[in-house]
Amino acid sequence: MNEARILVIEDDADINEVACTRLERAGYDCTAAYSGSEARLLLDRAGSSADRPDAGNVADCGFDCIVTDLMLPGLSGEKLVTMLRERGAGVPIIVISARDTVADRVALLKLGADDYLVKPFDLDELVVRVQAQLRGRGYGYGGSPTAARSDLDTARSALTKGSSAQPAVGASGSATADDRARLLAAGRWTLDPAARTFVVDGQPVALTNTEFNIIELLMAHPNTVFTKQQVYELCWKEPYMVDDNTVTAHVSKIRAKLKPSGTESYIRTVWGLGFKLDV
C-alpha cells in the first residue's frame, strides 16, 4: 500500500525543508511547494493523474493531507483552501501561520481548513496533527493505511452499547448484515463510515475530514448531547485546551452546507451544554 502523501506549501525554504524532513521521518511521502501558484499546478496534475489504487475521495486532489502557509507568492493560502473546497475536495488541510488571533483561526476554519497551527511551532506537534487528520482516513501513525478501528470508533463503543440510528436499506429491500455494520441513517441523511461518504436525499455532500467526523459522531448517537470538549476530543483526537470557538465554527460550516437541503436543523444547539442530532 502507498504511503500517505503530504503536500507542504511554504515559501520559506528553511521551514519547508525541515517540515518535509520531519514528516518523511515519520513515514510520509512529502511534496514541497514554495508558492501558491506552484501548489495549484501540483494539485491539478496530481488530481488528474488518478494513478493511485487506494485513492478514495480523500485523494481527489492527489494528496492525503495538505499543510499550507497563508502568505504565499502567486496565490494565498486562503484562496487555495477556498479553491479546494469549491472543487469538493475533502482532503484535510492544516494551516500554519504567524497570525495568532482567534479571529484568524475561526476565519480559516470557516473557509474549510481542518486545523490551524501557529508559528513558531514544534515539528513533533506538526506530525501529531497530521496523524490526527489521517487517522480518520484509515492511516496509522507511520503513514501507511491500517485496518485498525479509529479512536472515534473506540469512543463510540465506550459511550454507548447501541444506537437508535437505523441502517439504510439495500437494493433488495432489506438491510443486510454488511449494511447494518457499514451505514448510518437518520431522517434524510445516510452516512457510510467505510467509504467516507455522506448523502442527503441521495445527493452527496462534500465534507472535510473533521466535518465528516462530527456528523458521524452525532449520527452514531442521535439525541445524545455532546459538549464542545467531547466533540473536540473525539473528532480532533487531541486534548481540549481552551474554548476558542473551533467546534462552533465547524458546526456552522456544516449547517451552511446542509441549508440547501433544509436539514441544517438536524444539528441542534443545546444552549449551555453542546450539540446533538435531533431528527
Image (spheres, rainbow, N blue to C red):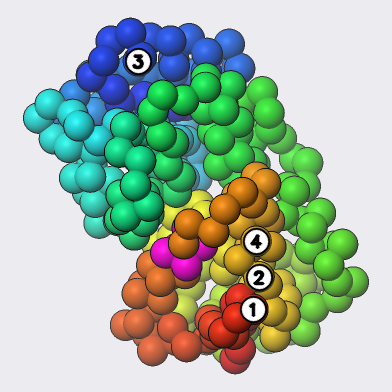
The CA span between labels 4 and 3 is: 32 Å
- Residue closest to the eye, 7 or 42: 7
Q: Which stretch did the figure color magenta?
A: 246-250
Q: Which residue is mark 4?
A: 229
Query: Disc 1, disc 4: CB below 8 Å?
Result: no
User: Of circles 4 and 3, which is in front?
Assistant: 4
Check disc 1 and give the amino acid type: Leu
Q: Secondary structure at mark 2?
A: strand
Q: Which residue is mark 1?
A: 273
Q: Tell me the number on the disc at residue 227.
A: 2
Query: Disc 4, disc 2: CB below 8 Å?
Result: yes
The CA span between labels 1 and 4 is: 10 Å
In the rendered image, residue 98, in percent from the top left (x then y), is placed at: 32, 32
Q: Quadrant of residue 206?
A: bottom left
Q: Residues within 10 Å of mark 3 (few under 14, many from 20)?
A: many
Check disc 4 and give the amino acid type: Gln
Query: Disc 4, disc 3: CB below 8 Å?
Result: no
The CA span between labels 2 and 1 is: 6 Å
The CA span between labels 4 and 2 is: 5 Å
Query: Disc 2, disc 1: CB below 8 Å?
Result: yes
* Between discs 4 and 3, the one toward the N terminus: 3
Check disc 3 and give the amino acid type: Asn
* Between discs 2 and 1, the one toward the N terminus: 2
Q: Quadrant of the C terminus?
A: bottom right
Main secondary structure found in the magenta portion? helix
Vertical side of 218 occupied by 87: above or below: above
